[in-house]
Each structure stands twice: as structure tokens, then as C-alpha cells.
Amino acid sequence: MVKDTSVEITHEHILKAKEILIARQDTHLDSLAERLREPRIRAIIEPMLAGLELGNVPADDIQFVLDLGLCKMDPQGGLTIANPIYREVLPRVLTVTPMASLPKIAPTWLTPEGELNTDALLQAFLKFWRQHGEPLLGSAVYHEIAPHLVLMAFLHRVVNGGGTLEREYAIGSGRMDLCLKYGTVKLGIEVKVWRDKIKDPLSEGLEQIDYYLARIEADSGWLLIFDRRTKAPSLEERLSTQITTTENKRFVTVIRA
């Protein structure tokens, strides 16, 4: 990309090169799509993406993903994705079908000057989820993280106009963190799921997003709580937003969906 040796390599160059590698879908990256559908691999990757514990996974299956080079053991303990490119590729591969299933969405989140308006983006997401969210959940290959995948498919539509979407997830973290960057706008998003037999994740989520926003140097963000309990209220009843502040005075929009 940068052939002139007198030109300094910047962070933006690295990000662009990463996007080129991923978009190019070299054979070993492309083959991940088929691998991720294998039950023994899905049993490990799905809880990792969801931030859950692995559960009763056979040791042979863990060794299998290690031998494939898909995962590695973190020196500080626990299984993790083998490298940053794979960490980026895995969720993208899984969002292909939800992205293909998305309806046409007008970019109402952009200002006349082409900048991202986060308030307009919030309204666009709420409208999208109210009309299409639950029907699209069935298009996701990994059911435990179906809301995450549909959300990321929506956000990919947003960043296709010239932004980036970064993801962070880990075993046992209980969340997935997303950082949407578009021009000068940086939006931190924490995704949590309210499942049966656990308490409302609001308080834990506010602590976690407070830390995440500090790390990405953002003053505000979204805490998105997907209610997947068996007896959850209807979508119309539970879909809501509330603006609150964290312990360190960062503004967070809590979205219940």
C-alpha cells in the first residue's frame, strides 16, 4: 500500500490493510466459514462470542481448535481467539446471512454534511428492531448470539458508508463490546443478554461500559440489553431507552430490546 519508503506508516494504514485482508477472503480465511458450522467448533466459539463459560466441552474438542490454530491458551489463563485478524473475521463471517437478510435501510443517521448523528442512529436502530429484529434472529447461525449478530449486521450497514466497527469478547466476560467509529464520532456499545435464572444485568453492565468507555476514550455510549428470558414481555412492551450516568459521570443510553 505504502510503497514510498519516505512515507511514515500510520495507524490508519494498518487499519486499511486489515480491511483489505479481510475483504480479500484468502483461502484460509474463507474456509473459516465452513469450520464455524462444525458442532464441535461451534460449542467453543459460540460461548466465547457470547461471553459465557465453556461448560462441559470435551478436552479433545479444545485441543482440536488449538491444533487448527483457531484458538490459543492465554498466558493469563483461559482460551482465546488465536490472533486479532481471526477475532475480527469470526463475527463477520457469522453476520453474512443476517446482512443478506436485511431490508433496505435509508441512512437517516447521516447529517447533510455526511457526519454521523448518534441520536438519529438510535432512532433508526429502534425502528429497525421494532420492525425486523425478532424475525431476523432466525437467520443467525449461532442462536445464543443471534441478537448480537443481527445488531452487528445493522451496524455494518452503517459503517459501510465510511466507518469501522471493532469488537471485543472473551470467555466468561458476560458481554460483547463494540466500538463504532465514523469520522470524528466514536460510539462505545456494550451488549448484554438477560437470560433465564440471572438477575437484570443493568448494574453490572453500567460498571462494565464505564470501564470500556474509559479505555476507548469516549464520553458516552450505549448499553444494549437483549431480554431473552422465556417469559420476557413482548417486544412492544420492553423496547425502551433511558439515559443515565455511570459512576465516573459518563452518559450512557440504556436500550432494552
Image (spheres, rainbow, N blue to C red):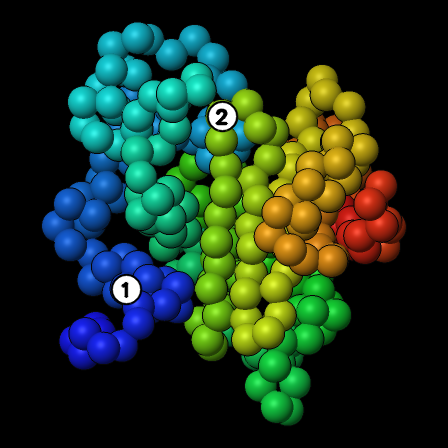
Left or right: where 245 falls relative to 215: right
In the image, farthest residue toward the bottom: 112
The answer, for residue 239, to whether it is visible in the render is no
Q: Residue at x 56, y 50 (%)?
A: 178
Up-down relation of residue 216 to residue 78 (above or below) = below
Quarter occupied by residue 5: bottom left
Q: Which residue is mark 2?
A: 171
The picture places residue 243, in percent across and down from the top left corner, at 85, 55
Which label number is shown at residue 236? Answer: none
Q: Secondary structure at mark 2?
A: loop
Looking at the rendered structure, the kind of residue marked 1 is Ala
Q: Are discs 2 and 1 less than 8 Å apart at CB?
A: no
Front one among 189 and 156: 189
Callout 2 environment at 10 Å: few (<14), some (14 to 19), or many (20+)?
Answer: many
Q: Residue at x 30, y 28 (%)?
A: 71
Callout 1 environment at 10 Å: few (<14), some (14 to 19), or many (20+)?
Answer: few
Quarter occupied by residue 66: top left
Q: Which residue is mark 1?
A: 17
The answer, for residue 22, to whether it is visible in the render is yes
Task: Give the spatial CA distance, label 2 vs label 1.
Answer: 28 Å
Up-down relation of residue 182 to residue 53 (above or below) = below
Looking at the rendered structure, the kind of residue marked 2 is Ile
Is the N terminus in the top left, top right, bottom left or bottom right quadrant? bottom left
Q: Secondary structure at mark 1?
A: helix
Number of dots carrying numbers: 2
Q: Residue at x 61, y 81 (%)?
A: 115
Q: Nearer the viewer, mark 2 or mark 1?
A: 1
